[in-house]
Image (cartoon, rainbow, N blue to C red):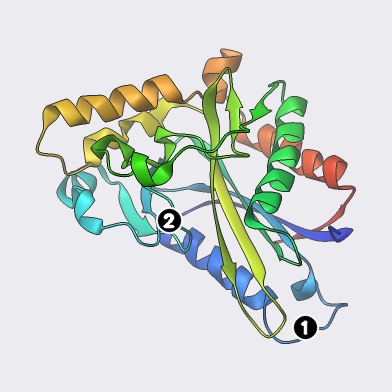
Amino acid sequence: MIPSRWRFLNTGARAGSLNMALDEHLARRLGEEAPDPRSRDALPILRLFRWDPWAISLGYNQQLREIDIGACRRDGVDVVRRPTGGRAILHAEELTYSVVMAAGRRSILQVYNEISRALVRGLLLFGVKASVQRSQPDFAEAYRQPSSIPCFSSSARYEIEWGGRKLVGSAQRRFSGGGGDVVLQHGSILCGPAHQDLARYLRLGDGVVRDQIRNALRERTVDLSTILNRCVDTEELAACIRRGFALEWSVTFTEAH
């Protein structure tokens, strides 16, 4: 069962290190021993946020040596590590969501599916009819290819696509605590094409591989501004995403800052 009361946070644009630290803090806090069920700290959380400056986030186990730190510093792009898994993402023209909730008896894929349905509902309110990916690629095989360095190079099961191209990329982790296992899932809702510039910041000796990555991101992803042929108002999008969760899950949000 999904709880009927949730906290909602729209924390605006922050540095990548603060965004990732806050996500992990919220997850660990919810998993603490027996929180007062009447307190806001006991409620699951939907958070929406952006990145300032733009940042590359690495999956929890990804190697830092894959990133050209000098190029990032030159262009003012931060490099941070996510508390979740997956591959590199350039967080640029996007709205990022974060869900922190008790795992209960739900599997990883069940949680992905539940969250994706809510996101699809919110995107529909924004005017975009997206769909949920039903198949699961062979990541063990895909990760052997240099072009797999970007997280957006392929869609996992229950991630969100439009026209067969990835629109939302997500990652998940579970934290164990005295209050039970807690899920942290966060992901990028692509609002513009700037994420495709990730190839500029990868440490690659082969220009052919760089072109492969750039082409893969261009061919396999899509963003809201391209779909709608207009600039994306992230505050309008945030309101639709919040409403989508409320409708899909029949939940009531408590505002928090």
Task: Give x and y (percent) for residue 74.
Answer: 18, 44
The residue that disc 2 covers is: 16
Residue 107 vs 52, above or below: the answer is below
Residue 31 vs 24, above or below: the answer is below
**Quarter where residue 33 is shown:** bottom right
The residue that disc 1 covers is: 35
- Residue 190 visible (yes or no): no
- Horizontal side, residue 214 vs residue 50: left or right: left
Residue 230 or residue 25, whichever sits in front: 25
Q: Residues within 10 Å of mark 1 (few under 14, many from 20)?
A: some
Q: Distance between the residues labelled 2 and 1?
A: 28 Å
Residue 41 or residue 174, whichever sits in front: 174
Task: Give x and y (percent) for residue 151.
Answer: 41, 42
Residue 56 or residue 179, whichever sits in front: 179
| Quadrant in which the C terminus appears | bottom right
State the SS at label 1: loop
Task: Give x and y (percent) for residue 89.
Answer: 39, 44
Residue 218 vs 142, above or below: the answer is above
- Horizontal side, residue 125 vs residue 198: left or right: right
Q: Residues within 10 Å of mark 2 (few under 14, many from 20)?
A: many
Residue furthest to the top in view is 229
Identified by mark 1, the residue type is Pro
| Residue at the image position 54 percent from the left and 38 percent from the top | 136
Task: Give x and y (percent) for residue 254.
Answer: 83, 59
Identified by mark 2, the residue type is Gly
| Quadrant in which the N terminus appears | bottom right
| Residue at the image position 65 percent from the left and 50 percent from the top | 109
Counting the numbered discs, the total is: 2
State the SS at label 2: helix
Residue 25 vs 130, above or below: the answer is below
- Horizontal side, residue 16 vs residue 39: left or right: left
